[in-house]
Image (spheres, coloured by chain):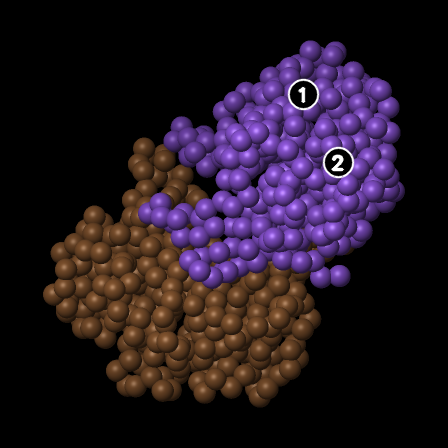
Chain colours: A purple, B brown
Amino acid sequence: MTNPVLVEVVRGAAVESRHRGAVAICDTEGADYLAIGDVATPIFPRSAVKPFQALLVVESGAADAYGLSDQALAIACASHGGEPAHVVAVEGFLACAGLDGGALECGAHWPLHQASARALAHDHKAPSALHNNCSGKHAAMLCVACKLGIDHRHYIDAEHPVQREIRATLEGAFGVRLDTYGIDGCSLPTYPVPLRNLARAFARFGTGRHLGAQRYAAARRLMTSCAEHPLYVGGTDRFCTAVLGGLRNRAFVKVGAEGVIGGVVPELGLGIAVKCDDGGQRAAEVIMAALLMRMLPLSAEEGAFLEARVRPPMKNWNGLVVGELRPVSALIGPSARGTGNVAP
Amino acid sequence: MTNPVLVEVVRGAAVESRHRGAVAICDTEGADYLAIGDVATPIFPRSAVKPFQALLVVESGAADAYGLSDQALAIACASHGGEPAHVVAVEGFLACAGLDGGALECGAHWPLHQASARALAHDHKAPSALHNNCSGKHAAMLCVACKLGIDHRHYIDAEHPVQREIRATLEGAFGVRLDTYGIDGCSLPTYPVPLRNLARAFARFGTGRHLGAQRYAAARRLMTSCAEHPLYVGGTDRFCTAVLGGLRNRAFVKVGAEGVIGGVVPELGLGIAVKCDDGGQRAAEVIMAALLMRMLPLSAEEGAFLEARVRPPMKNWNGLVVGELRPVSALIGPSARGTGNVAP
């Protein structure tokens, strides 16, 4: 199946590049609200599943036992920019369990937030695992191990008790057996899941249906923490942070690498999963913004906020607008306020 | 026309992402050696045409009049990393015509070479137009204006005499009228050209056929400068620099933004033009490496050099190999040493 072009990159009067992809929007029962392209073949969800991986830090009792802050719970779900506030939050997170950055097994990289990377260099410092965009998630896993009284070393291995527990959580959420996996950028396993199952999992995460009271309480606690502290979910100029800040608790979204974004619109009971074929993050963001604009009845302010992300301008080094990204009309669909099934 | 998948991004045992694209390889008469996908619809060649834009700095007599070094001629063709050596070269280039970085109209950006960007920050400095990856090309245009006794201000405008001259050069090279254009990242016009015409233009550039003695002498001088100073054409860890260094004067290649690469294999009399649909640079590089491997009879050393670029490993933040990029078999084609027409 050839997925359709969903986003065009326009320069002057011409289309310069094209991004193909697939979209699944479905309810808590897995019924399609919208299905574009291949929503049945498993894809690697990457960091889009961080909120599901983070459930365990609440459900295990670690969050309460260690008195984790809402910022810590937000950064447990994050792909953060390695900004100073993120590093402080992860250090504090680890300290709650008597650990420090040395326990992290995610590897080090320069902060994704370029100004923070330059500030580090400016101060003659090298990046550590604390700056890794996944360090909050790893801190959560370490806290779980400590709470359960398990040796935390090698917590990144697929067969470590913490990862086995998380795989069980993901299998429940996705409704599929997770027998195979790839290794993610931060060395954790990433399990392939069909886009439709990912969308359904987000629908359940955001509404609690088929989730059980305890798990829904954990999911709500995580979503509330993210909505109240969006800067900890991504960072300056990052998509998740912008959407969480702009739409507050009307939508919850989480990006993953290679063009994946998952999300849920709780008031509609609909989960969303996007995968850009070529891994293009810029396109996945346009797709998600267009879908949210299509689905949600919006205030003028919310509409203006999303519109800027549906057709983001491309500026050159002199600040001139030389083009834009734009979603194809099939993606924009009938004007918002959508309920019921809509054909792609 | 839907271009085929040319590069797969593999994680573990599964394909995670896919890049589609088109490839034109043809001789100096425009006869196809290989045509994959849409080679007839114009695409923006972006910085892949810098060698053609640079012809004027030689043909105008500016290179001789100002005693430009081979490094200067190499950086006139470059999309450089903004490394210290690049900045020094462009400053020296401008100084030859009595100018400095203040004359550049390309805009400023942080060096593409991350370590150089961090070194700037470390020294409490901000980037200037000299760090712009296109500053060498702009220096060449400024030198042309000075040599011709023309006011150099607004040399970036499509109707400035320098740009009119360059457009005429490009029309001759491409064999098409260039009536429309987009604005490039550095504010210069970028004229759309069919991939097949771009490949033919490179074939002629590299062999001199249909070029005229004077233009071929200019082209050879530029290519020789690039082959002898590959670091000035890109920089540390950059594709053009690697290929020019690894294959010496057996192949000349130049990348452009949004997944474009042009090149020529002079000994085969064949030009190459690649466009990745989605603008993915990583895929365009794999495609070009695979094509060169397919076309050229290689020494063991050259083969090993290219092979590493045909299937580059993907490593994660712990340095583990978690996947690779790989060209599809249709791209690799029959084992190298190709002459004559080969079906995709």
Quarter in which the N terminus of chain B is drawn: bottom right
Instruction: Specify the amino acid type for callout 2.
Output: Leu
Q: Looking at this view, is A218 or A123 the one in front?
A: A218
Q: Identify the residue at the far left of this view.
A: B149
Q: Nearer the viewer, mark 2 or mark 1?
A: 2
* Residue A306: mark in rendering: none
Chain assignment, label 2: A
Callout 2: SS: strand
A106 with respect to B23 (left or right): right
B65 with respect to A233 (left or right): left
Callout 1: SS: helix
* Residue A270: mark in rendering: 2
Q: Looking at this view, is A274 or B300 the one in front?
A: A274
B36 with respect to B128 (left or right): right
Q: Position of residue B54 (x, y in %)?
A: 30, 68
Q: Looking at this view, is B209 or A340 the one in front?
A: A340
Instruction: Specify the amino acid type for callout 1.
Output: Thr
Question: Relative to residue A93, is residue B89 depicted above or below?
Answer: below
Inter-mark Cα distance, 2 to 1: 18 Å
Mark 1, residue position: A224
Chain assignment, label 1: A
Few, some or many residues within 10 Å of mark 1 (<14, 14–19, 20+): some
Q: Position of residue B110 (x, y in %)?
A: 38, 44
Quarter in which the C terminus of chain B is drawn: bottom right
